[in-house]
Image: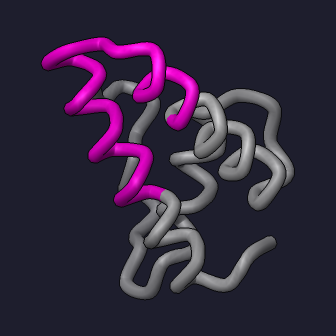
Amino acid sequence: MAHPAVLRDLIEQYETLKVLQAENGGEEVRRRMDDFAYTLCVSTGTRDVDAALIAARHRLPGARPEDDSVLST
């Protein structure tokens, strides 16, 4: 598992790209999102980006068990 500082950076960059994807959906943004999704999965030992985001957030300082509920959007 990657260091929490690395995970925080990966989460922030992935979420920023997700916003950009929603706004203009360019090929470069999609490719970078895929790269960050892959890196998050490798860094957390998961196979899909949603699970990777949850696992990464749980490794951050101050995370609580109810953070990133599977019911949240």
Indicate the position of residue 34 as horizontal and vertical percent values.
61, 29
Of residues 24 and 58, which is closer to you in this image?
Answer: 24
Tell me where the magenta segment starts and ends, as one range: 11-32
Residue 43 belongs to magenta span: no
In the displayed structure image, the side of residue 62 where residue 43 appears, left or right: right
Indicate the position of residue 52 as horizontal and vertical percent values.
64, 45
Looking at the picture, the colour scheme in use is: one colour
At 45% from the left edge and 71% from the top edge, which residue is drawn?
Answer: 8
Residue 70 figure quarter: top left
Hey, which residue is sitting farthest left in the picture? Answer: 23
Report the magenta stretch's main SS: helix
Total residue callouts: 0
Which quarter of the image is occupied by the C terminus?
Answer: top left
Above or below — where is 1 with respect to 52? below
Of residues 73 and 27, which is closer to you in this image?
Answer: 27
At 41% from the left edge and 73% from the top edge, which residue is drawn?
Answer: 63
Of residues 30 and 55, which is closer to you in this image?
Answer: 30
At 45% from the left edge and 70% from the top edge, which residue is drawn?
Answer: 9
Of residues 30 and 43, which is closer to you in this image?
Answer: 30
